Amino acid sequence: MFNETRFPFHRFSQRYVEVLGVLAQDTDVAVLKDVCKGFVCVIENSWECKNAEMSKVVLQYMLKASRHPEYAVRQEALEVWTPCAHSPDMLQLVRPLLPELVPVLLANMVYSQADYMSMEPATIDDDNAGVPDQAADIMPRMHKEDGDDDDDGGRGHNGGGAWGAEWTARKAAASSLDNLANAFRSEILQVVLPLIQQKLEDQSWEVQESGVLALGAIAFGCMEDLVQFLPRVMELLLKLVEAPKPLLRSISCWCATRFSSWICHEKNPNREQVLRSVLQALLKRVLDKNKRVQEAACSAFATLEEEARYQLVPYLDDIVQTLVQAFQYYQAKNLLILYDASGTLAQAVGPELNQPLYVQALLTPIMQKFESTPDNDRTLVALFECLSQFAQNLGDALMPAIPRITQRLVRLVQEGSRAAQMWLQNPNEFEKPDREVMAASIDLLSGIVEGLGPRVGEVLSQLNFLCIVPEVLKDIAMQVKQSAFALVGDSAKICIDYLAPFLPEILPFCAKSLRENTSATVSNNASWAIGEICVKVGPDFMAPYMDDIMQALISVLRR
């Protein structure tokens, strides 16, 4: 909250806490909300003035505020419990509060008006699968670049989606229960399990739904102690997956795969039967008439794929058939999750998917999307990530489509590179380009190199797409450089002859990136690429570049 080097606030921290204590007696909602924020700051940042006695008083106050009649106060107060779960000292103080705290958390997990207001209409409407998504419904895939702290380039989904973009008391309560379950494990289970059972047996679907949410929240932390109950739990969840209310169906899909590790565990005596039942239920919901349920089921299926892997092989006929139907059925937003589920399937079962019927069935709609999706459509990123998984795991099976794919990728990268250079030269005249499609294009080229192996030479002999590398390495965007150096490393391992003509330009860029060291992942990929090149080309080729490269590597080691 405060930068100690610029503003040594610690000198006033004790007085600040005293003032919070006075203001805590106020009745104004805005004041109480800010008091809760202040106490959260004190606890979360472990201020020096914080001692056991003061913390006890603060937690008692925050527990009371967590059930305040005003929603805004509850929402702020609930934020204190997650940082407590990560502090051994605070956990000792929270432990005696569990019998009182856990019911408060569960009460806040029932849908409120604020939750409904933050949802998209697709969450509540029953039969809306045929309604096209509006552009505003599709959350953009956000990324960071140009020296941002996040080295992964932000290549994930932005928050929000069908659950609502706003942070709510419900989400804060569920997050708190999740973190406390990971900390207390069997201790909290004794308190929470009877409460969850009550909620699951309630006549109100909204109360039932909060029980399912709570069950999912404790899944990871309490898994070992829940094992004895899980056969009955799974039976109940698979019934709720068929519930009339879309929100109850969707949360049940999510909750079921929170227990994926148990479902697929070799010590589960009914593993095959349970997996089959869960898989059948999820595949049915993947084709649900409600878009939110589709999203939850498809996402849950992708989670299950990662855990089940080759256990899915006996069900590939049903899985592939369902995914193909979903490609015909899904609107724009849910296609993002469908691409992920399809790519994850290729990764999970690998060569078992490499059968002509499966490959043709899945690649036909995917390539239709590849051909029809405009260059400026951000869903290309998810599509390219999906194709990359197919390329890496199916290899030769993609060979007929590879020329079309590489031609478009080279064009997208070249156009993106030109736009970036124009913007860098005249930022006032040109708009800053979006590098994410450009980086995803390079990543897909790497996937093609890795997947095709030596046969990539057949592609490169017709179109040497490695010609793009020197130009894109001039870009300042970290995610573009990271992807480009990965492509260099993969190409050095597999097809050095086609990379060699560009090495006089590429190697100085490797050294330059190491000297600048603006991103750990970029430096890592650059140094790895240098190593792979050295292995293939030998000392005579590398001699002119070694002084520059060695100085750059030494500078990294000295930091």
Image (cartoon, rainbow, N blue to C red):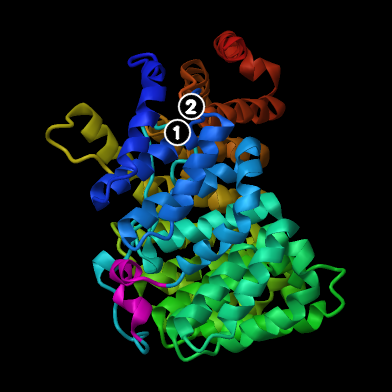
Q: Residue at x 61, y 73 (%)?
A: 195
Q: Position of residue 74 (x, y in %)?
A: 38, 56
- Which comes sooner in the sequence, label 2 or label 1? 1
Element under label 1?
A: helix
Q: Amino acid at mark 1?
A: Val
Q: Amino acid at mark 2?
A: Trp
Instruction: Tell whether position 469 is magenta.
Output: no
Quarter-of-image position of residue 415: top left
Q: Is residue 164 above or below residue 250?
A: above
Left or right placement of residue 324 versus residue 431 in this view: right
Magenta span: 111-125
Left or right placement of residue 311 versus residue 65 in this view: right
Q: Position of residue 288 (x, y in %)?
A: 47, 86
Q: Is residue 9 visible?
A: yes
Q: Nearer the viewer, residue 555 or 359?
A: 555
Q: Nearer the viewer, residue 379 or 58?
A: 58
Q: Which residue is mark 2?
A: 47
